Image (cartoon, helix red, strand yellow):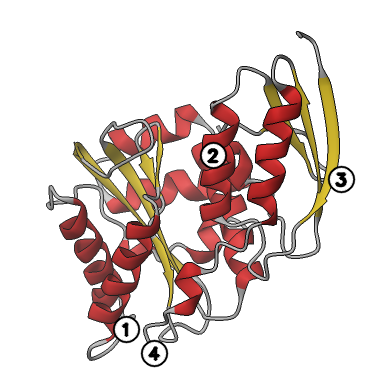
Amino acid sequence: MTGDSVRKTVAITNPHGFHMRPMAAFAEAANRFPCSVTVIRPGMAPVNGKSMLALLGLNAPQGTELVIEVTGAGAAEAMQALVLILQRNFDEEEKETTR
Amino acid sequence: MRMSEFIIREAISADLKASQKNEVIREMVENLRLAGYFKGSEPEDVVKAILKRELLSSTGIGDGVAIPHAKHPGVERLVGTVAVSPKGVPFDSVDNDSVYVLVMLISPQERPSEHLRALEGVSRCLKDKNFVRSLRQATTPQHIWDLICNHDRGAP
């Protein structure tokens, strides 16, 4: 099915916000699908969800609600994968501190 | 947050000597130490923290750019530095290409918002391919600093 479009609002629950590790996982997942992925922080221009450099500009701390738009083949499957990533904690580096 | 607000001018390098990922990270932390940051065993702690973070996933985000970073109690505010490797360094990047421009960020612990604002500033600069190209062609740290300041001001 081509041309499918799915839109979902997801709140960032990670205490460290949407930082580089979840961003990298998000971009990697987005690039696995042929559909387009756009991330919107309300009040800001939409960014390409397949680009790490673009995602870095979101500045989304904990509590930020991001709108994810996925359009094209496999949109539903892609959205499911992307939401799972946003809901992960990515806290492995926090469990071991240098001091 | 503009890059010129947290990049330490005295720690900038236009010609990284190291050719391996671990050595590049050490060289950049040493540049920060020479610029007056970190004391005693702190530089080694910072290097270890950055390398530990790299093990989780490479900060080589593609297009010849890497953003190695860590949190450390040795800084009261977020500090960073920029380094250029003319020959490129293998960095386990997502596109498997070498890295030529590195932006290192060291954040205080428990200040995630500052780190995210810094990443926004880094993104604003590194999304500009002309800016990245100019960085790679810079021959002195002062030139790199001028490029950063001009970009922050919106100048061509």
Location of mark 3 (residue): A42
Location of mark 1 (residue): B38
B25 lies above or below B58: below
Label 3 and label 1: CA atoms lie apart by 39 Å
Give residue B44's quadrant in the image. bottom left
* Tag 4 near tag 1, CB within 8 Å: no
Percent of width and height locating residue B41 = 23, 88
Mark 3 element type: loop
Tell whether A31 sits left or right of B64: right
Label 3 and label 4: CA atoms lie apart by 37 Å
* Tag 3 near tag 2, CB within 8 Å: no
Disc number placed over residue A99 in the picture, else none: 4
The numbered mark, 3 or 2, whose residue comes first in the sequence reads 3
Asked if badge 3 and badge 4 are on a common chain, one would say yes
> Going 26% across and 62% down the picture, which residue do you hit?
B28
Q: Amino acid at mark 3?
A: Pro
Percent of width and height locating residue B114 = 62, 69
A3 or B92, which is in the foreground? A3
Asked if badge 3 and badge 2 are on a common chain, one would say yes
Q: Residues within 10 Å of mark 2 (few under 14, many from 20)?
A: many
Label 4 and label 1: CA atoms lie apart by 15 Å
Quarter holding the N terminus of chain B? bottom right
